Image (cartoon, rainbow, N blue to C red):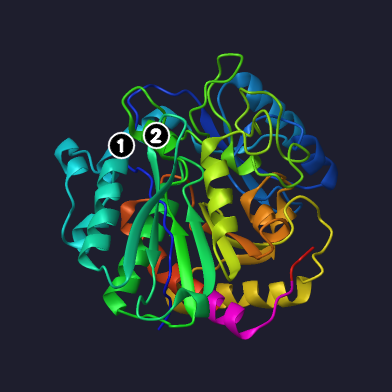
């Protein structure tokens, strides 16, 4: 069985916004490196993680000007979602729209995972798990968001064994507000661990599911926007939001990011300018005996290893590739879904949490992109996605315990 100490952050989850949001989602084929490099200079909302030759990318264009700029590079792109606003309305029944449910715990985990849940319901669920399983679960708050919401962590471990004898592994989800399946998957991992009562006395695992509670709440707030990505910082020019996954102190502000506050990949005024990233970085650094971490995202079905800020191979490339390939094989064996195992720099980006975990926290840092094909994944995927990722992280944990992966610096 598997793990033991886990720190989880839980974020909100669920209602579609009522504000009309114009735009289309395009699918464009990247034929040349020149196209990829030119596209990288555009400040548009890329949905797929990769921008690679020989692959399709998905991009949300908010107006004709953005669409023309994209198609000037790639030629005519196919339209995946012709009207974003209508698409959001068509999927309203995927979300838990019952406001009364946000203040109570759904006792049955089966019911809980039938829909995406609000932030308040998630917090209540985390607290319930902790109070019902005090020998395995500890709930705590490690910081506050820009708007003052709690950023909780859930620690799961065998309390009969001293933490000093355990290795620690960290799981994060919810850094980008719109990636609802990532939040629900991390929650499902907790439920799975509890239902199996599996506690490996050599492991301490920390799962975080709500790093961006304000942004997440905005994705279901009437007047908000379902596909919001950033936090809710009011910037100097009146625009809103910092991309928390560009705000870490690791090659901050260099690649795949923007100094424009209105950009979806705005990196903030300085590394760790945001309380959400500062709190999690301080927390990770405080964990004793830490060896590895995964940052869970959607929607690209990929397992991403170092590095993300450069296409140069990590000095641990061989063993990291073996680990990533093994996780992909476990997922395929579990569900039949095919996840790519590749370097994170398929989309060059800096200031990201996975690279920071590797370079600054000196652990084995990864990004895991869940199944798609968009950010709006039907809730019928929550349990299957959770099952396949549980298989992958079981392999991940055992691999890290059984193999020496030196600091990648």
Residue 119 lies left or right of residue 179; in this view the side is: left
Horizontal and vertical percent for residue 77? 64, 37
Q: Are marks 2 and 1 in contact (CB under 8 Å)?
A: yes
Residue 79 lies left or right of residue 111; in this view the side is: right
Q: Is residue 242 visible?
A: yes
Q: Is residue 44 above or below residue 179?
A: above
Q: Is residue 231 above or below residue 136?
A: above
Residue drawn at x 75%, y 38% is 40
Give the residues in magenta: 396-406
The secondary structure that dominates the magenta segment is: helix
Residue drawn at x 56%, y 61% is 294
Q: Earlier in the sequence, mark 2 or mark 1?
A: 1
Number of the label disc, if any, that sits on residue 219: 2
| Local crowd size for mark 1, using a 10 Å CA cut-off: few (<14), some (14–19), many (≥20) | many
Number of the label disc, if any, that sits on residue 15: 1
Horizontal and vertical percent for residue 19? 37, 22
Q: Is residue 73 above or below residue 354?
A: above
* Residue 69: quarter of image: top right
Quadrant the C terminus occupies: bottom right
Residue 14 lies left or right of residue 179; in this view the side is: left
Residue drawn at x 46%, y 48% is 174
Q: Estimate the spatial distance between the alpha carbons at disc 2 and disc 1, rounded to whole Å.
A: 7 Å
């Amino acid at each position: 069985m598997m793990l033991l100490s886990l720190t989880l952050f839980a974020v909100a989850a669920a209602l579609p916004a009522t504000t009309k949001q114009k735009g289309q989602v395009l699918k464009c084929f990247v034929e040349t490196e020149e196209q990829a490099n030119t596209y990288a200079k555009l400040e548009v909302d890329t949905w797929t993680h990769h921008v690679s030759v020989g692959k399709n990318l998905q991009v949300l264009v908010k107006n004709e000007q953005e669409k023309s700029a994209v198609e000037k590079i790639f030629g005519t792109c196919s339209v995946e979602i012709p009207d974003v606003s209508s698409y959001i309305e068509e999927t309203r029944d995927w979300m838990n729209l019952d406001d009364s449910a946000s203040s109570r715990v759904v006792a049955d985990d089966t019911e809980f995972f039938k829909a995406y849940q609000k932030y308040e319901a998630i917090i209540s669920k985390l607290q319930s798990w902790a109070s019902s399983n005090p020998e395995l679960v500890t709930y705590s708050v490690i910081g506050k968001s820009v708007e003052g919401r709690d950023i909780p962590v859930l620690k799961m471990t065998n309390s009969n064994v001293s933490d000093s004898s355990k290795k620690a592994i960290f799981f994060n989800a919810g850094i980008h507000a719109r990636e609802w399946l990532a939040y629900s998957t991390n929650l499902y991992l907790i439920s799975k661990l509890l239902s199996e009562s599996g506690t490996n006395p050599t492991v301490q695992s920390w799962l975080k599911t709500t790093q961006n509670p304000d942004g997440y709440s905005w994705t279901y707030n009437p007047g908000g926007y379902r596909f919001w990505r950033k936090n809710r910082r009011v910037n100097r020019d009146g625009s809103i939001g910092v991309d928390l996954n560009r705000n870490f102190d690791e090659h901050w502000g260099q690649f795949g990011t923007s100094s424009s506050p209105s950009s979806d990949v705005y990196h903030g005024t300085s590394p760790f300018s945001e309380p959400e990233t500062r709190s999690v970085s301080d927390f990770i650094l405080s964990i004793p005996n830490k060896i590895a971490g995964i940052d869970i995202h959607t929607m690209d079905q990929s397992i991403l290893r170092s590095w993300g800020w450069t296409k140069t191979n990590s000095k641990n490339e061989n063993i990291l590739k073996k680990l990533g390939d093994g996780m992909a094989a476990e997922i395929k064996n579990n569900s039949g879904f095919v996840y790519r195992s590749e370097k994170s720099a398929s989309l060059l980006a800096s200031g990201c949490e996975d690279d920071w975990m590797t370079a600054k926290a000196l652990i084995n840092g990864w990004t895991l992109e869940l199944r798609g094909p968009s950010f709006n994944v039907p809730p019928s995927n929550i349990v299957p996605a959770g099952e396949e990722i549980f298989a992958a992280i079981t392999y991940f944990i055992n691999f890290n315990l059984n193999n020496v992966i030196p600091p990648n610096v």
